[in-house]
Image (cartoon, grey):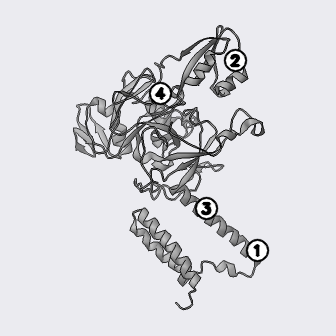
Amino acid sequence: MKQISKRQWINFSIWAVIYILFAIWMENLWLLFGLIVIVDIFLTKYIPWGSWKKSKNPKVRETLEWIDDVLFALIAVYIINLFVFQNYQIPTSSLEKSLLVGDYLFVSKLSFGPRVPNTPLSFPLVQNTLPILNCKSYIEWPEWGYKRVKGLGTVKRYDIVVFNFPAGDTIALYAQNPDFYNLVEIYGRENIIANKTKFGEVMYRPVDKRENYVKRCIGMPGDTLSVIDNQVYINSVEAYNPEHLQFNYYVETDGSVLTEDQFSMLGINKSDRALVSMNPMVYCLPMTKKAVEMVKRIPTVKQVRIEPDDLRGSTYPTGYRTGWTRDNFGPIWIPEKGETIRLDERNLALYHRCIRNYENNTLEIFPDGKILINGKPEASYTFKYDYYFMMGDNRHNSADSRAWGFVPEDHIVGKPILIWLSLEKDRGLFNGGIRWNRMFRMVHAN
């Protein structure tokens, strides 16, 4: 012990305290056995951790030093990505104009508490597939159950939330949009499995390796939610409409074509413009309330009307007739942890995915009405998780809980807190392609 320097003791003490606090935060005292490694790295040095530094070959030392730096960086990035924050790019327009396609976000995992990973052995900064190699970026064993450690808060109504796509538990590799369950409704399970050329392999993904989605939390556990003529109601009370809420509108002109400057003024990208008719000239455009007021002031515009309800679109639950549509949905009760429901035909249609897929029970339904959960006859079910109802602010162009159902608490990833980069897809990088006014802007739930 006399050979151990004061500097070694200081370094050991700092890292030991950090590691102990981490073990307490993780609520897993088994991690304290890792202190043995820290003791050896800084004090006893029975294992020659840095023996490569003594090599007489400078090229060997240089190469191993580079490898050592890369490994340290990968481990640091992996830990930060798991427990602190991760980068996320907005891929679709479902939250326009609150968040725009091309926004790059820092997503805080501390806001709601980080999850202990279901698949701890995975490549950092990759969600589920390694680029180029086009193979899984994770090893399925070991696969741990759900555990969330304490964070700075909990999900609140109207928060913008990043979460793992619940209906992404099973995928057809070559056809992931729409989700697998809608594909089954359209083509049949047997046809999907048999036609690997078109659909690819059918595979399961653990919770933390399902695709990341971002939506606004509209419904909380225990709420009864409904949508009536595009207005959301929570427990029969009108919900708050976000500032940048938008719907699709038919815009009819006197035959004139809307100009690029006019589209730019309205904030409508090229991919969001749809020409419905040439005679008369009618566009279908997603617009906020403010944009609707602006387009009505354009001299060549004759009429503006909201897009009619989509009566043909599929809504949750898949394969069960509710009469619900995109603009008139519900009422539907959102499951709450500890609450019990009766297992009748309607409740089984609405909540069987919660029971079977999300809470990992076996569920058998027989023609005579008998119901077995985990092999036992049951007439009711008590939920283990809280669930949330997520919707996009771009209401007519958002595949959200109206299409695929509830988001279980174990699928919650984090909260977007900062836009660190924003790129306009319709413009070149040096021709207005960078939205400087959105750089380093906080994400607010409004």
Total numbered labels placed on residues in the image? 4
Q: Position of residue 379 (x, y in %)?
A: 22, 38
Tell me the SS state at disc 3: helix
Quote the CA–CA distance across marks 4 and 2: 38 Å
40 versus 374 height, above or below: below
Q: Earlier in the sequence, mark 2 or mark 3?
A: 3
Q: Nearer the viewer, mark 1 or mark 2?
A: 2
Q: Which residue is mark 2?
A: 258
Q: Earlier in the sequence, mark 3 or mark 4?
A: 3
Number of residues whose C-alpha sits closer than 10 Å to that of mark 1, classed few (under 14), some (14–19) or many (20 or more)? few
Q: Residue at x 64, y 50 (%)?
A: 133
Question: In the image, what residue type sits under mark 3?
Answer: Leu
Question: In the image, what residue type sits under mark 4?
Answer: Ile
306 versus 186 height, above or below: above
Q: Which numbered tag is attached to residue 186?
A: 4
Q: Which residue is mark 1?
A: 59
Q: Which numbered tag is attached to residue 236?
A: none
Q: Residue at x 60, y 38 (%)?
A: 91
Q: Residue at x 68, y 23 (%)?
A: 263
Relative horizontal placement of residue 124, taking residue 28 as reference (left or right): right
